[in-house]
Each structure stands twice: as C-alpha cells, then as structure tokens.
Image (cartoon, helix red, strand yellow):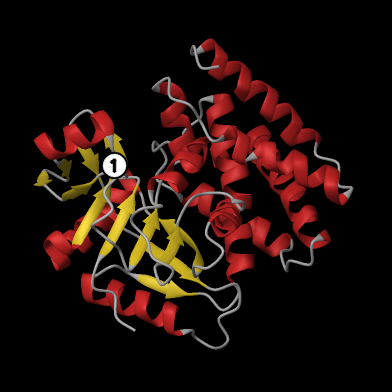
Amino acid sequence: MDINKAAIVGFGAIGCTYGRRLYNLMGNSFAVIAGGNRAKRLREKGETINGENIMPLVVEPDNENWKADLVIFSVKNYQLESAINDIKNIITPDTIILTILNGVTARDKIKEAYPKNTVLYGLSKSDAERTPEGIKCSWEGVIEFGEADNTVISPEVKAVKDLFDRAGIKNDICKDMIRAVWVKFMRNVGMNQLSAATGSPYWGFGGIPELNRALREVMREVMFIAQNKGINIDENDVEECVRIAVGSEPNSKTSMLQDMEAGRKTEVGSFSGVVIEEGLKNGVPTPWNNCLYMILKTKEQLNGIK
C-alpha cells in the first residue's frame, strides 16, 4: 500500500509545521483542504513558517476531481464538524484518515462519519505557534499515531509511517494509542486550562505552589476517569506530566493561553467539558474541572465569544 496523494485540513501552526514537510516531498500531490476566504488567502499569500514562504496546492471542499490517499485532520475541536464535511468529496473508501487533534473524542466522531475508512488515532508534540510574523517552530517534535492496538502493524499504519519517514517527519507508532491519547489529554486538561485561567506561563507550574497543586488535582480527575474506563494511567503519569510542565521553557505560554490572550475561541469544551461529561458517565466527581469550565467560558464571553 502506497500513499501518493496526501492532504491536510487545518493549516494552522501544527498543520503547517508538518504540511511543509509533505509539500517539500510531494509538491502538488500534497494539498490543503480549504474554502472561501481561507482558500483565497492561501492561494494569494501561502503560509510563512520560520521565515520560509510555502505555496501549497489548495483544494476546495466542492472539488470532486482531486482524491487523497491520506487526509490529516489538524483543526481545533470546535472546527471538527465543518472539517468532517469538507473532506467528503476528497476521499474514497480507501482513503486513510489520521487525526492529530487534542482531546479524546475526535477520532470516534470522524469514524462515525466515515465508517468505511481506516481512521487512525494520533497526537502531535511540537512548540509551533502563530505570531504576527507568521508561524514559528523551533521544535517540530513527533507525531505519535496508529490503530488502538499496534501489537501487529497494519498495512495502513505502515503506509503512513513510510510517508512520514520519507518526508522527514519524526513519528512513533505507539503500542497502546488509547493510553497515549488519554495521557496527552490529561496533560492538556491540566496545563492548558490552568494557564488560560490564571494567565501564568510555564514557570508558574514550578514556581507557584498553589498552581503546582492545582495541576495535580485537575489531572487526577482525568486519571480516575481513565482508570474507570480500563485505561492504564496512574500517579506516575501524573507526576511525569508535572515534570514536563515544570521543565518547559519558563516564559513560554501554552497554546490555550495564547488563544485566550488573542481573544480567540478555546477548546475548553473538548477539555473540561469532556471531563465533566465523562465524569458523570463514570461516576467520578470533577469539581476542579467544573470550576475551570465556568471560569474559562466566562473569560471567553468577556472576550466577546459566545
């Protein structure tokens, strides 16, 4: 199985970071799926990352003549519903779909929409961010991806890995992707939400005892839900997430804090919103996430976001 044509839906900081690699490898066999003003802007100006301007092929959602062997989702969770609709003319039943969205719900939503397709779990680790000068990325990180269980590597997973290797995209096939996705979810629920609620850059997680304690408490609610669902997450994972937060560039800010400060919509609904919902389903109290949800939704409304 070979991947000869690939597309990304969602060409923001993360999507562009990996899309640049695919564009440099594949040329016009790589496309960005976009419509309306977004498509017009990309065709006219392209995208700039680390000072390099790239002009990828732009395929609009109503185009029925361009078909992809692989589609990567890299939108925000609140954009997922429209993105799912945007790819319907771009795929065939053989198209592999990979999501690298934050959270734990995107893959199942995509699979529900396209049950005949192979839909892979995935997550990305990168420091890419959008600035007034364009996208900046000093650490491209890694894409972790695969089926739920990768004890035996499927042909689809192998095909994606072969493409990523040729493009120079660092990648890792996790044996247990459900666990990997939930560990990252736990970290995002803690670090992203607390930073957005408090305005603290990374140094606060190690320098402010109250914030350090709050980080653990917020993440433990996710841990207890995961354990109730049979997912192997424990206190060692909580402490590893704390170490990552404390060891991050002190004055850097999480993506959610950047969104909040820029007046953009956040992914709170897919973070604490999902934790609250899963807590109710699994009989796990989630008071910390309940409080964060109300604070962050209030801040969004103060920013003029309904």
Rendered residue at 43%/58% (across/down): 124
Identify which residue is drawn at 45% across, 56% down: 100
Check the picture and name the quadrant holding the C terminus. top right
Quarter occupied by residue 132: top left
Badge count: 1
The residue tagged 1 is 34
| Residue 70 figure quarter | bottom left
- Above or below residue 99? Residue 169 is below
Q: In the rendered view, does 221 fall on the left or right side of 262?
A: right
The quarter of the picture where the N terminus appears is: bottom left
- Type of the residue with mark 1: Ala
Residue at 44% over, 45% down:
85
- Image coordinates of residue 179 in percent, x first then y, are 64, 66
Residue 51 in percent (x, y) is at 11, 43
> Visible in this render: residue 240?
no
Q: Is residue 16 left or right of residue 245?
A: left
Residue 195 makes an appearance in the image: yes
Give 134 or 122, whichever is nearer the viewer.
122
Residue lying at the far front of the rendered structure:
64
Q: Is residue 286 above or below residue 137?
A: above
Q: Measured from the top left, where is residue 71 in percent x and y? A: 36, 60
- Residue 25 image point, x, y percent: 15, 68
Q: Secondary structure at mark 1?
A: loop
127 or 67: which is nearer to us?
A: 67
Q: Is residue 281 left or right of residue 211?
A: right
- Residue at 37% x, 61% y is 91
Q: Residues within 10 Å of mark 1 (few under 14, many from 20)?
A: many
In the rendered structure, the answer to whether residue 209 lies left or right of residue 87 reads right
